[in-house]
Amino acid sequence: MSRLKANLLLLLVSIIWGSSFVAQKLGAEHVGILTFNAARFGLGALAVSPLAWREWRRVGMPARFWPGLLLTGVALLCGSLLQQLGVTLTSVTNAGFITGLYVPLVPIIGFLALRHRPHPVIWPAAALSLVGTWFLSGGGGLEFAPGDFWVLISSVFWACHVLLVGRMAIRSGAPTVVAFVQFAFCALVGGGVCLIVDPQPFAGAMDAIPEIAYVGLMSVGLAFTLQSVTQRYTPAADAAIILSGETVFSAVGGVLVMGETFNGVKLAGCAAILVAMLMVQLVPGMGRKNPC
């Protein structure tokens, strides 16, 4: 695969992830968050299963990795449920940009939990992200909307998930098996809870099929696989810039599909968060030789 082709596929990943916020919000109008979540991860697991089965037969998955796999599934389940709850209570634009806070949170949590010393740029980037989040949610002393709060909490779980996926994929040598197990965990556990607490879990499900199919097959299944493959062929700087476009595409989707509007304060918040994410990804690599 050429570098240009890899970059174009990464652009497709960022478009899929950004536009998925619109599908999540539209789907929430017809079906509960537990049902939506279980369905999308069930479809994602089915989409990844052929690759995972092939990799399982070739590499296997020793028993010592299963606790980490299950913990990865827990982080993904919590992050996705909280994000879906937040999307129903805030704008697509806010949800997309606030979710992006997981980027500066990853090295912070890595340092606290794993003693990985972060690059010094993480501290100003984290502060800039928080300021951007405040602006995005209104600024000027306005309080956060409930949805913004839940999406913000979900970003912590997304950061933990990124760390866990990285460790599990590297140590096990079976990234598609890791993907399948966590997707299946979310579908089974989330679906089981849904059947227990929701007296009518499938009410409105038929009306949400297009949104469930898009998020399950495209965002969960296709985009995750494309990211894993293409980042072997493109420099980290290219990947960071292109994938950070997820936040931009979520805002574009909110304006075009949901009729959301921007003002100067929110635009400043978006810019601050995007700059913080790029600082975290690009500054540590400055001065190093390009691996490609």
Image (tube, rainbow, N blue to C red):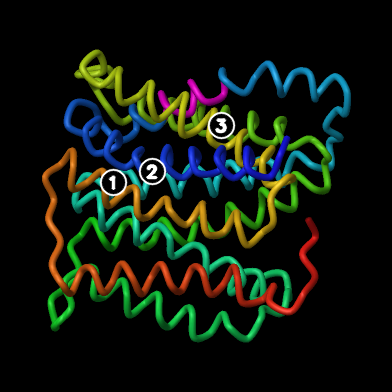
Do the numbered discs 3 and 2 sit on residues whose CB atoms are within 8 Å? no
Residue 85 is marked as: 1
Viewer-side residue, 258 vs 137: 258
3 or 2: tag closer to the N-terminus: 2
Q: Which image quarter is the N terminus in? A: top right
- Is 123 magenta? The answer is no
Query: Which element is circle 3 on?
Result: helix
Q: Badge 3: how crowded within 10 Å, few (<14), some, or many (20+)?
A: many
Label 2 SS: helix
All told, the count of numbered labels is 3
The amino acid sitting under disc 1 is Leu
Residue 263 sits above or below residue 82 on the image: below
Rendering coords of residue 77 (x, y %): 48, 42
Which contiguous range is marked in magenta?
A: 38-45
Disc 3 from disc 2: Cα separation:
13 Å
Counting from the top left corner in percent of width and height, residue 61 is at 83, 32
- The amino acid at mark 3 is Phe
Q: What residue type is labelled 2?
A: Leu
Horizontal and vertical percent position of residue 62:
86, 35
Residue 269 lies in what quarter of the image? bottom left
Q: Quick one: label 3 or label 1, which is nearer the N terminus?
A: 1
How far, Cα to Cα, is label 3 from label 1?
19 Å
Question: From the viewer's perspective, is residue 160 above or below residue 134?
Answer: above
Secondary structure of the residue carrying numbered label 1: helix
CA separation, marks 2 and 1? 6 Å
Residue 265 image label: none
Majority SS type along the magenta span: helix
| Residue at image coords 18%, 42% | 256
Residue with the mark numbered 3: 183
Query: CB of mark 2 within 8 Å of CB of mark 1?
Result: yes
Quickly name the residue at label 2.
81
Residue drawn at x 68%, y 77% is: 286
